[in-house]
Amino acid sequence: MMRVDLHVHSSHSDGADSLETVIEKARHAGVTTLSFVDHDITGTYEAALPAAEEAGIDLIPGIEISAYDFKRKRKIHVLGYSYDLEAPNIKALTEPLLERRHKHSLQQIESINAAGCRVDAEAIAEIAAPSRVIYKQHIMRYLTDNGYESEAYQHLYKSLFKGDGPAAGDIEYIDARDALRAIRADGGLAVIAHPGQMDSYDFIEENTDLIDGLELLHPDHNEDDHARIREIADGYGLALTGGSDYHGSFGVEVPIGVDAEMLRFERHLLGDS
């Protein structure tokens, strides 16, 4: 069985593990093709390439753009693959987004401090490295050693970042259609990430002219999602991708790798041009 994983995250964004650790885990899992889709950055591919080549794993340039469906007022994540590494159009969208996210995280740290829970921004920045942006997961790592899936972690997370918590609120995201266009303008394939998890189906149906593929395999998808995604993809001739959405200890514990036989790729997505 050929195993691939086109959706993993590293410590270059909101994943807990280094590039080398993720690649080694992928090698042990029998993964032959891998794509880091760290949030809103394009540099992970070049940083990871030496370790991937040493491990005998084919690496595909990837990104996950934090976007928004303004019509339905909900988040949409857009995956981009095999784009031009200079990526001028993608970077024009994501560089301001990264700045907004980092600034927002610093404001969240100030709000948490004001609420009486002392946190050190410099120490959190050290935890976040090599990511240039602080994420909520880095703040949580500073505050607790409890695991992501533990009741204690989830209670603290929700009390700080949800509802009336002192660090609640979010940043302004990119219009999902702009994200799709930017990926294509940079020669890449534009894929809607985990549409079942984020209920992106109506957006997909309205924007199939901008979309190259849908993420079929994802830990949060069930059989109904699989059937619906396959039906849409078959109807519009879209690629099917998949991955673990691996974040290490910063997310739900999942194995790296999915069955490539269940997917349908554009030929050059797997380097077979």
Image: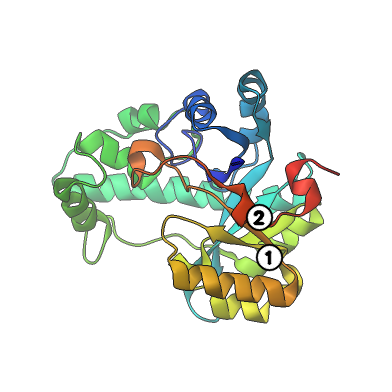
Does label 2 or label 1 sit earlier along the sequence? 2
Q: Which residue is mark 1?
A: 178
The answer to whether the residues at label 2 and label 1 have Cβ atoms under 8 Å apart is: yes
Please state which amino acid type lies under the numbered disc 1: Asp
- Which one is nearer the viewer's eye here, 190 or 27? 27
Q: The C terminus lies in which quarter of the figure?
A: top right
For residue 119, say whether it is visible: no
Q: Mark 1, residues whose alpha carbon is within 10 Å: few (<14), some, or many (≥20)?
A: some
Q: Which residue is mark 2?
A: 93
Please state which amino acid type lies under the numbered disc 2: Leu
> Residue 226, image x and y in percent?
52, 68
- Which one is nearer the viewer's eye here, 181 or 117? 181
Q: Mark 2, residues whose alpha carbon is within 10 Å: few (<14), some, or many (≥20)?
A: some
Please give the name of the residue rendered at 45% of the width and 59% of the height, measured from the top-left corner: 171
- Res 51 → quadrant: top right
The colour scheme is rainbow
Relative side of 248 to 235, left or right: left
Q: Secondary structure at mark 1?
A: helix
- Which one is nearer the viewer's eye here, 61 or 168? 61
Residue projecting furthest to the front: 1
- Res 270 → quadrant: top right
> Residue 149, image x and y in percent?
24, 47
